[in-house]
Image (spheres, rainbow, N blue to C red):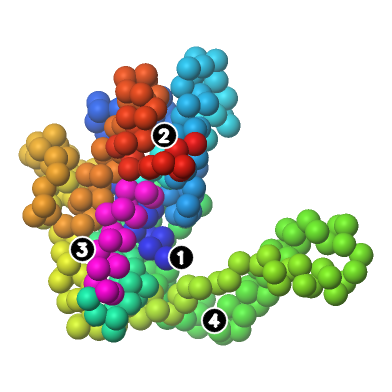
Amino acid sequence: MSEHLTHIAVYEDCARIILNTDKFSQTFKICVRDHYDSGLFTSGSRGNHLFAVPILEKFKDRWEQVSTDPEACQQIAGSIGWITHRAADLQMKPTWRAKTAEDPDFPDTEMQVYHDSVTFREVYSGGSISTGSTLEQLNPHTLEKRLGTQPAAGELDPQKLEELITILYQKQFVELHTFHKTQADINQWVEDFIEYHQEFTEDLRLYIEAFQNPDPVKMETYVNGIHFYDPDDPIIQWVRRVQHHQDPPHINLDEALVADESISHYAKALQRGFRYLSAADGYFQNRISKEECYDVLEIKGDNRL
């Protein structure tokens, strides 16, 4: 879940720029509009940005033939999500690492939790506003301890319900493994499962605590001290008004999208996302070369597939 909320928020804000300006091709607009979930899903997944450019390369010269193919559109939307994920990572991670190197008492993993809590409050109004996807539902109970104000919490034991759902999830995930179909030795099956299962490293309780009871010192160190989010940044004002279905403020979007060292890291992530996506769109439209696109995306050497 690490920085999941911030990743999907950056994707959604970049999608607002794509869909509500004339700065992107109709291809990108159509893929984001019609396959929004694909981009949202990939924006929250790690390590897959390497496939973004190859996917664009796969479809760019035969777009007229595949433009009505849902799978092609889904893949392009997925590429857009991966690109925004990379933009957020390259903006945020150096700051996390520098802070931890400066003071190991403030680990970068905890900083990510605090950033997500701020994103939940500022971008999603503490759950009063959900995402643009019906498959990624946020509500005021998302970061609430034991679903405290959820009416059903008074009729059920939330802890026992969590344990039950956990068991059901585990059962479903185990059933997804294919080696049990061919592995007759139960002991070897168990060993294979232990070897290949993914460790669960995130604790939702930390996110709940950071949102519900943020530590003042940690807020100053992790959020205010590094200037993580500023609602007065022009680009943030612009995307928030679009999000809330309000007329955009009298802000020159071209100026708001130009690099500015004085703005918050979240705003810089949106600027970086815009630069990356502009390069990807330019490559798809054959306005720039593949190598030029990789240069803008800051993907180097053997990672250029």
Any magenta on residue 236?
no
Q: Tell me where residue 32 sits by quadrant.
A: top left
At horizontal 39% and vertical 27% (from top left) the residue drawn is 290
Closest to the observer: 164 or 175? 175
Q: Tell me where residue 189 sits by quadrant.
A: bottom right
Q: In the rendered image, is residue 52 in sight?
A: no
Q: Indicate whether 252 appears above or below 153.
A: above
* Chain part drawn in magenta: 85-101
At horizontal 46% and vertical 29% (from top left) the residue drawn is 56
Observer-side mark, 2 or 1, equals 1
Secondary element type, mark 3: loop
Mark 1 sits on what residue?
A: 1
At horizontal 28% and vertical 74% (from top left) the residue drawn is 100
Left or right relative to 217: residue 5: right
- Tell me, yes or no, whether the two marked residues, 2 and 1, touch with CB atoms within 8 Å: no
* Precedes in sequence: disc 1 or disc 4: 1
* Precedes in sequence: disc 4 or disc 2: 2
* Precedes in sequence: disc 2 or disc 3: 2
Mark 3 sits on what residue?
A: 228
Q: What whole-number distance in Å separates the C-alpha atoms at marks 2 and 3?
A: 29 Å
Left or right relative to 232: residue 118: right
Q: Indicate whether 228 appears above or below 303.
A: below
> Which amino acid, by three-letter code, is at mark 3?
Phe
Residue 224 in percent (x, y) is at 16, 70
Mark 4 sits on what residue?
A: 158
Residue 246 in percent (x, y) is at 20, 43
Any magenta on residue 87?
yes
Secondary element type, mark 2: helix
Q: In the rendered image, is residue 142 in sight?
A: yes
Mark 2 sits on what residue?
A: 33
